[in-house]
Image (spheres, rainbow, N blue to C red):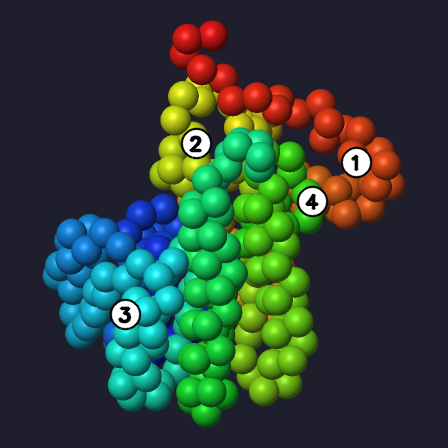
Amino acid sequence: MLLSFDRIIITGASSGFGEAYARRLADGCKEMVLIARRVDRLEALKDELEAQHRGLSVLPICCDLSDAAARELLLGRLSCLPPMCTLLINNAGMGDYGAFADSDPARNHLMMEVNMTALTHLTRALLPPMLAKGGAVMNVASLAADVFIPDFAIYAASKSYVASFSEALHIELKEQGVGVLAVCPGPVHTEFGQVARREGFTGNMTPGKDAFDSSVTTVVEGSLRALAAGKSRYYPSLKIRVLALLLRNLPLGLLRFVLAFRPRRVQSDSV
């Protein structure tokens, strides 16, 4: 049986996993806080969910989580909400595919702010009321958390942080009744890949990924079951669990050798 929460707070709620979690959890929830940058999508989702689920109140909040000042305003609004049993889903994330030497320093900063700093700030701010009223935290990491990835250097490193942070909190908070789960999907068809691509790239960011693809529905349903079961980490399929195990246990020299054969150049239409 899945856990029951009075309030659901979701970052990156305008598309992908965030939107799917909102639709899946709306039934039986009293209050939902949807956080993203695209306010038009949030408003449309609010109208849809409130029309379909009687008694549900949806609060859309437009916030750029990469902006420290915007985060402070968000945390101020959240602190004014009355304490209740809450599920926080830290889903917002950014990626960037390409050589680090050619990366945009400003984008690198934004990626680290969204993937790590915002997630950490939100979790810290919301844990005290969770400890008082009950709750849980789901942090969307990635299979990339288990390995360093050429051309995804910052993204993979940031997801390693998310998974490690989540595992530590899982142990800290287990006896206090607050569950913490790191969700580690492999390749999934969402808007993430389009946003992570640099201009001019026409190749495949993850060769062979089709063998490890999962659907958004599979990840959402499976991660909620894993949270209810008190697990600390979730992989959406046996193939991905086995791959993660291999990545964690391969000798470092062999892993470097294998990853050296990844495509390393951004491909242009003009080539």
SS under mark 3: strand
Instruction: Locate residue 270: give its quadrant.
Output: top left
Q: Residue at x 50, y 69 (%)?
A: 120
Earlier-in-chain disc, 2 versus 1: 2
Q: Report the front residue among 73 and 129.
A: 73
Earlier-in-chain disc, 4 versus 1: 4
Asked if labels 1 and 3 touch by Cβ distance under 8 angstroms, the answer is: no
- At label 2, the amino acid type is Arg
- At label 1, the amino acid type is Leu
How crowded pointer 1 is (Cα within 10 Å; few <14, some 14-19, many 20+) is rated as: some
Earlier-in-chain disc, 3 versus 1: 3
- Judged left or right of residue 187, residue 51 is left
Which residue is identified by label 3? 32
How crowded pointer 4 is (Cα within 10 Å; few <14, some 14-19, many 20+) is rated as: some
Residue 187 vertical placement versus 210 (above, below): below
Earlier-in-chain disc, 3 versus 4: 3
Q: Which mark is residue 182?
A: none
- At label 4, the amino acid type is Val
Judge whether residue 217 can be spotted in this image. Answer: no
Instruction: Locate residue 253: give its quadrant.
Output: top right
Q: Residue at x 61, y 59 (%)?
A: 161
Asked if labels 1 and 2 touch by Cβ distance under 8 angstroms, the answer is: no
Asked if labels 1 and 4 touch by Cβ distance under 8 angstroms, the answer is: yes
- Judged left or right of residue 45, residue 161 is right
Q: Report the front residue among 67 and 128.
A: 67
Disc 2 versus disc 1: nearer the observer: 2
- Residue 47 in the image, given as x and y percentages of width and height: 13, 59
Which residue is identified by label 2? 197
Which residue is identified by label 4? 147
Which residue is identified by label 1? 255
- Residue 262 in the image, given as x and y percentages of width and height: 66, 25
